[in-house]
Structure formats: structure tokens, C-alpha cells
Amino acid sequence: MQIPVVRNVLEANEKMAAQVRERLRGILTLNLISSPGAGKTSLLERTLRDLAGEFRMAVIEGDLQTDNDARRVAATGAQAVQINTDGGCHLDSNMISTALDALDLSQVDILFIENVGNLVCPVEFDCGEDAKVALLSVTEGDDKPEKYPLLFNLARAMILNKVDLLPHVDFDMARARAFATRLNKELAVFEVSCRSGEGLDGWYDWLRRMRAEKVRD
Amino acid sequence: MHEMSLAQNILDIARQELQARGCTRLTGVHLRCGALAGVEVSSLRFGFEVLLQGTPDETARLEIEEVPLRLRCGACGAEFGGEGRLALWEPCPFCGEQLGHEVLQGKELNIVAIEGT
């Protein structure tokens, strides 16, 4: 017998994401997505140190293997929990829900989810975040927004990292910016160097605004 | 790379629906898969087969209807697409605008029917 139904294949993830979102009420939650090596962990290290006096921040680290990144961010004094996906290409809301048990959420203003380095799969799985943040570095191709449009279409902010290397690479900043911002008119763009600290003030101001917006809701 | 977990989700949903109707064997699943759903169809088929191997549902078929993108132009508001291979930044056939289109169809990943006995 044939049974007609309409069920979203990702519904289990989306239901769990709604529960995670409920647990995270009042906590600004950002899902950080980039290729491997774009500088997600470096951005977090800088941010956690520079804003330590202003916000209480926590990090959920997603990697295939090792707890290297959780140790790096924990060294800043922030709460950190590592998820190892053992080969899995993305984090999902079930993993986030488990990771939340290891955090004291009453002591958190901003939660960063550092997703597995990958521009494709993490975009498909809602982790219960308020916003996705795309990170791109100038040592990659300036056509990344063209090749992976869904991420840049859905993200609220795009960070262009490693701008201190611009004199040494052929990255066309105007091309990357123009394509991404036309794809997504709401996209906030920050050109930064996590190494020198250049441009990070704009990112911090955006975090402050997002946090204020979250608290108001 | 996440097709295996999608295949598992599909089987979980299908078995749940069958059970609710007193069926015991799964014989087929019909899926609608959007062009922008991020699914590699051959990997999904492979995952589905692997998960069913050695189970009573081993011969169940996976039928996949691929759904092309349909867009609304960000500049002039015209709707276009719905067939062939279309990119999110396809130039609008009416005004030429390439970007800022709204996706009307093509992100879905839905089970639309299940067969069982």
C-alpha cells in the first residue's frame, strides 16, 4: 500500500533545534561557519580576550578529531566544550543539546558554536543559533561566495580575515564583497586581521548590537 | 558527506509512518529533493542501500524527484526558473538582474509517500 505523507527529512534536527533555542533564551548564539584554516579559532581567541571584561562567553567547538581548539579557547578563561564528530562533516542540534549539558548557561551572555570546517553541510543543519556568521580568509578564492551561495545567502555577517596578507595574495576584495552583499542585502561585512587586530572593532560593535537586540526580545 | 545521516532520518520517518498504520515491511520511499537542498543524490542512494542491507526491508526502493530552483527576481519581482539547472544568481530573463533573488522552490527535502505491506 502507498501512504501519502509530507514529512521534512530534517524535521528531527529542526525540532531539536527549537528545543535548543528555548534553552538558550537570552543568550546570543552564533554559528560560525568557514573552510578549514580560515581562522575561526583565532577569531574566537581574540574576541574572547578582548571582550572578556564586557561579556561572559562560552564556546562549543566542533572538530572531527582532537580537543586542540577547545584547549586554545579555554586558555582565554572562557567556558569551552569540545564535540568530536568522528568524521561527521557538520554539527547538528542533537550534538549541541548534549554539549549544553556541560556548560553553566546561567553564566553565559554570548555562545559561539564553532562548526566543523566546511562550507557546505553545516549550512543545512540548524543548531538553534540566532545567526550564522560566515568567515572567509583572503588566502582563499575571492569567488567563494559564488561557489557556496547558500551560506552567504543565509549568514547575517561575513568576516574577511587575514587582511594583513592582502599585499601578498591576489584576492579581489571588491569582488568577494560585491557578490556576497548583492546575494544578501542584510549582510554585515567586516575586514579583519586576527593576527594584527585590524578591523576587529567593527565586529565587536556588531556583537554588542546583536547582544542588545537579543536581550530586548 | 551528510547523506548517510539523511538516509537514516528517511528510514526513521518511514518506519514510524508504517508502524502507525500497522504495516511491517517497507517497500519504497518517494522523496522530493530540491536543487539547493545540498544533497548528492547518488550518495543518498548508496547510504539508503547500505542501511537496508541484511534487514527485511532490503529490497525497498528509493524514488527521488529532483526539484529545480524557482526564483523571484530581487529587482523586478518576476518569477522564473522551475526547470533545468539553475543557479541562485541566474540572470533574470526579464531585467537581467543576477543577484538578490528569493528562492520560491528548491530548498525542500521532503518525503512525499511511503510504500509498505
Image (cartoon, rainbow, N blue to C red):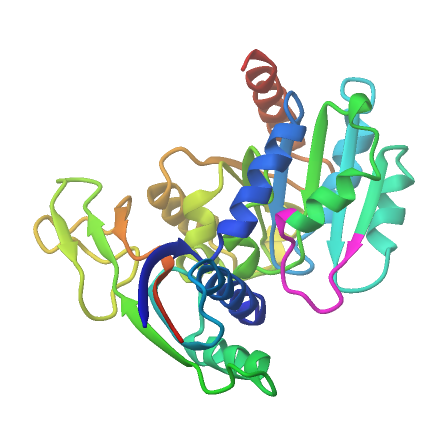
Drawn side of residue B27 relative to residue B74, left or right: right
- Tell me where residue B90 appears, x and y as whole percent: 23, 58
Q: Main secondary structure of the magenta part?
A: loop
* Residue A51 position by quadrant: top right
Does A84 lie within the magenta span? Answer: yes
Image quarter where the N terminus of chain B lies is: bottom right
- Tell me where residue A200 appears, x and y as whole percent: 66, 32
Drawn side of residue A76 relative to residue A123, left or right: right
Image quarter where the C terminus of chain B lies is: bottom left
* Residue A101 position by quadrant: top right
- Give the residues in magenta: A83-93
Q: Nearer the viewer, residue A126 or A118?
A: A126
Question: Can residue A177 be seen by looking at this rendering?
Answer: no
The residue positioned farthest toward the top in the image shown: A216
Point 62% across, 26% down: residue: A207
- Tell me where residue A39 appears, x and y as whole percent: 70, 51
In this rendering, the answer to whether A210 lies above or below A46 is above
The residue positioned farthest toward the front in the image shown: B22
- Tell me where residue A199 appears, x and y as whole percent: 63, 33
The residue positioned farthest toward the left in the image shown: B94
Q: Nearer the viewer, residue B11 or B35?
A: B11
